[in-house]
Image (cartoon, coloured by chain):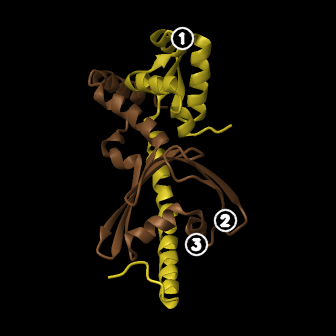
Chain colours: A brown, B yellow
Amino acid sequence: MERQNEKNNMTDRELVITRVLNAPRDLVWEVWTKPEHIKNWWGPNGFTNTINTMEVEPGGCWDFVMHGPDGTDYKNKSIYKEIVKPERIVFEHITGPHFTATVTFAEQGKKTLLTWRMLFDAAEQLQQVIKTFKADEGLKQNIEKLEVYLQQAKV
Amino acid sequence: MRRDVFQAIADPTRREIIHVLAGKSLTLNGVADSFGISRQAVSKHIKILTECGLVTIKESGRERYCQAKLDQLNEVSVWVEQYRKFFESTLDSLETYLDKLQSKNKKNGKTKRKK
């Protein structure tokens, strides 16, 4: 049996992106938390947005539609979990793909270091599967037996 | 209906089944026995797992054995990684917007922040 599990770790279920932005933290916070700003920049180049609801407070809803350059609409709904002005925003993206995002803003002189972590649920479930699979050392013998069996079973 | 590795692992019973099958091949009855759920329920889960490519059925004599195919699970990390591009370009777009905003503020003589 192929063991592809060795390289699986936190990074497999979590995306971490950092960026130093050439703007003061207060301004970065503002463009992340005001609908009149976020609609202008969210999504890759060429995307526009319609913000339906944006309640920047714990438990608040952020509901918007992204319009792709080819005319495709992408519905997005998130629930804000944590709002710590001007440092930290945590939101749970409840439409697919399901993930929890933590965005932090750190001052670096007149610049801002943005760190964006996204933890994907599907990947977390996968992690559970692999963890239990790996943790159970008692299974090893059975796996070896299975390998032998698979060799024999190969046509 | 969606049939991929995510569908396969979304259900806790299926995750358990994968776990058990990772250790040894079992017949449908064998799976049902180790879970204490009906053979019918097991069949349903095995069917989904088969369609998702995480389990294959091998005939051995008169028995049919369920086997886990774990190399499929790699797909998840590939899937996560593909979102990186999206969020990176969203940050590109944020950078452009911040630049635009700040040069506009400068032109209007407005400064966000006094030194």
For discs 1 and 3, the disc positioned in front in the rendered view: 3
Whether marks 2 and 3 lie on the same chain: yes
In percent of the image, x 39 and y 33: which residue is there? A128
- Image quadrant holding the N terminus of chain B, namely top right
- Given residues B63 and B84, the one toward you in this image is B84
Which secondary structure lies at badge 3?
A: loop
Q: Nearer the viewer, residue A71 or A27?
A: A27
Chain under disc 1: B
Residue A7 location (% of width, % of height): 32, 46
The verdict on a common chain for dots 2 and 1 is no
- The answer to whether dots 1 and 3 both sit on one chain is no
Task: Tell me the crowding category of disc 3: few under 14, some 14 to 19, or many 20 or more residues within 10 angstroms, Cα based.
Answer: some
Return the disc, 2 or 3, that comes first in the chain's sequence.
3
Residue at the spot 29% in from the left edge and 29% down from the top edge = A135
Classify the position of the C terminus of chain B by image quarter: bottom left
List x then y, in percent, for residue B10.
53, 33
Residue B43: which quarter of the image? top right
User: Which label sits on residue A45?
Assistant: 3
Element type at marker 1? Answer: loop
CB-based contact (under 8 Å), mark 2 and mark 1: no
* Residue B39 place in picture, x, y as percent: 58, 11
**Residue on which the image places disc 1:** B37
Answer yes or no: do the residues labelled 2 and 3 have beta carbons within 8 Å? no
The amino acid on which the numbered mark 1 sits, given as a three-letter code, is Ile
Which amino acid is tagged 2?
Answer: Gly
Distance from the alpha carbon under mark 2 to that under mark 3: 9 Å
Q: Is residue A4 above or below residue A63?
A: above
Q: Choose top left, top right, bottom left or bottom right for residue A114.
A: bottom left
User: What residue did someone put label 2 on?
Assistant: A68
Circle 1: is it few (<14), some (14-19), or many (20+) Cα within 10 Å? few
Q: Disc 1 versus disc 3: distance between alpha carbons?
A: 51 Å
